[in-house]
Amino acid sequence: MLSKKNETSQRSMFFGLEDMLDQRHPMYILANKVDWQMFEDSFSPLYCQDNGRPAKPIRLMVGLLILKHLRNISDESVVEQWSENIYYQYFCGQKEFIPVEPCEASELVHFRHRIGEWGIELILKESIRMNGNDSHDSTASIDTTVQEKNITFPTDSKLHRKIIDKCRKIAGKENLPVRQSYTRTLKRLSLDQRFRNHPRNKWKARKADRKEKTIAGRLVRELERNLLSNSRYQSDIDLFKRVLSQKKGDKNKVYSVHEPDVQCISKGKEHKKYEFGNKVSIIYTQTTGVIIGAMGFRNPYDGHTIEAALEQAERLLGKRTIKTLIGDRGYKGKKQINDTTIEIPKPFNNKKQSQYQQNKLKKQFKRRAAIEPINGHLKTDHRLNRNFYKGITGDNINVMLAAAAFNFKRMINKWKSSFWLVFKIQIVDLINAMFYQINNYFKLKWAF
């Protein structure tokens, strides 16, 4: 059920946040620039109109999602800091300061599930709109990076141990008979696996790994015998079997029991050979620096991501403005998609291109490298480095929220720089006026 709207016509007997805050503060300006009514109109049909418990205001929930990725904090932290920060409260539509938490942290999870990828894309679209004409650039750069999932480095031993633990939990929850718990056996095997890199313990650790896999298979088969064929745990049992049957050289392996859709991606990094998560495509305007496209994929070839990424960018911009798309050599094989030309670095042996065209392309290829630090900022500043959201939907939601936060932060930095520039000009004028007065004073003194 939608929450009741507060009456804004009646003035408070105390000073409101609008009267107390600095109107030059970037968060104050951002709160007045965002089109909150668009979110109200778009998300209102997702709620029941006349039944159920009143929900939290839509502006509050959308504002908390933006603040979370803008400040790189968790659900729990953003709810806690909201009760302490008056600018956060004004940004989320609060009129007076309230020293209590606005909602439970879990309500942000439910709100993300309610609006889905479509709703998060609206937030990204609004961040692009706020950048104005800077978003409409005929030349853009495209690049892919890896968004790591919140899992440990996968090993067969870890997966088998998790299968054993989950089988025990299911058996305990359903009160199923278990012939043997293997508690003492697993404790002894863990000691054998501890120093596996020592030459004397290498074969002992491998033997313990095989024994652990055998125990996991026994518990899965016993669980399957005791459960009904159409039980709600059948999908879990199928996943356990898939993990136990996979081998070293298999494709589409399972690297995590709680996140089976995680992909193993190799980007050729010397310090990190493999990354476990999903691939992300970023489209970034070359001259103005606005992210106009952010989309999650599994692990396709880079050239196969261009078409879907361009469709999303055109959907967010509302029209086709990208004429030239600059990528690295990972996009080799694609030269033209609709009206967009794909350019990748290459030697110029074509006599059809003039020297001016070649120099222009060389500058664009050099400028394309500017998207690499943008990927770094998305990871370190806006929570793209490690994704804590669940499933494939969580992957796509995290990517778009990080890109939206980057665009909002760009406008905040722009406003900050303009304020500092005006402040510096005022200080210089004040100093010049002081020297002018002092100079006139000494002139008058020597004249008499």
Image (spheres, rainbow, N blue to C red):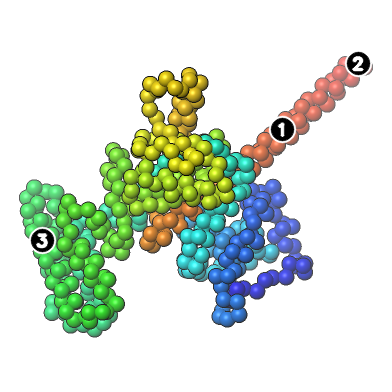
Query: Is label 2 or label 3 in front?
Result: 3
Q: Is residue 84 visible?
A: no
Residue at 44%, 22% (x, y): give it.
352
The residue type indicated by label 2 comes to Ala
Between label 3 and label 1, give the one nearer the viewer. 3
Question: Disc 3 or 1, which lies upstream in sequence?
Answer: 3
Percent coordinates x, y for residue 124 in the rendering: 53, 53
Residue 258 percent coordinates (x, y): 31, 64
Residue at 58 percent across and 59 percent down: it is: 63
Q: Nearer the viewer, residue 53 or 43?
A: 43
* Residue receiving disc 2: 447
Between 272 and 400, the residue placed more toward the observer is: 400
Pick the residue in front: 408 or 447.
408
- Secondary structure at badge 2 equals helix
Marks 2 and 1, how far apart at CA: 33 Å
Instruction: Return the mark for residue 425.
Output: 1
Task: Please name the amino acid that badge 3 sits on.
Answer: Arg
Closer mark to the observer between disc 2 and disc 1: 1
Amino acid type, label 1? Ile
Image side of residue 161 versus residue 259, left or right: left
Say few, some or many: other residues with alpha carbon within 10 Å of mark 3 (under 14 / 14 to 19 / 20 or more): some
- Residue, far right: 448
Query: Could you tell whether 205 is left or right of 45 in the image?
Result: left
* Disc number for residue 210: 3
